[in-house]
Image: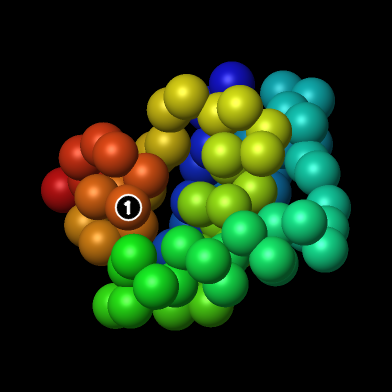
Amino acid sequence: MIFVDTNVFMYAVGRLVIDAGVDVWPLEAEDVYLARQLGQRFPALSARDLCCVASCQRWGVQTMRTFDRRLAQAFGGEALI
């Protein structure tokens, strides 16, 4: 599973979701709880980014595509830039 950060290209990725049948999952209470814990390790990330990382961890996402360097580092990868 690949997570695509839609912060910058929200409309283009939204079209991809519709065309390709990509899964979209809700943010759940467990994600928010984990995001709060991750905030201690990654204080530079926004609440939105922390929720993305937490949700990806819970869903077992192994790859993230993002232009955000901090988000990519928190996820354990590299930004696309």
77 horizontally vs 12: left or right: left
Q: Where is residue 65 in the image (x, y as percent from the top left)?
A: 39, 39
The kind of residue on which mark 1 rests is Ala
68 horizontally vs 50: left or right: left
Looking at the rendered structure, the secondary structure element under dot 1 is helix
Q: Which residue lies furthest to the left in this view?
A: 81
Above or below: residue 73 compared with residue 77: below
27 horizontally vs 44: left or right: right
Above or below: residue 37 compared with residue 16: below
Front residue of this view, candidates 10 and 72: 72
Task: Identify the residue shown where x is 34% and y is 65%.
Answer: 41
Task: Identify the residue shown where x is 44% and y is 72%.
Answer: 39
Count of numbered circles in the view: 1
Task: Identify the residue shown where x is 37% and y is 44%.
Answer: 75
Q: Residues within 10 Å of mark 1 (few under 14, many from 20)?
A: some
- Can residue 71 be seen here? The reply is yes
> Which image quarter: residue 77?
top left
Q: Where is residue 38 in the image (x, y as percent from the top left)?
A: 46, 63
Q: Where is residue 70 in the image (x, y as percent from the top left)?
A: 25, 61
Task: Return the residue at label 1.
Answer: 74
> Which image quarter: residue 43?
bottom left
Q: Where is residue 37 in the image (x, y as percent from the top left)?
A: 53, 66
Colour pattern: rainbow
> Which image quarter: residue 59?
top right
- Can residue 19 be seen here? The reply is no
79 horizontally vs 22: left or right: left
Task: Identify the residue shown where x is 59% and y is 21%.
Answer: 1
Front residue of this view, candidates 30 and 73: 30
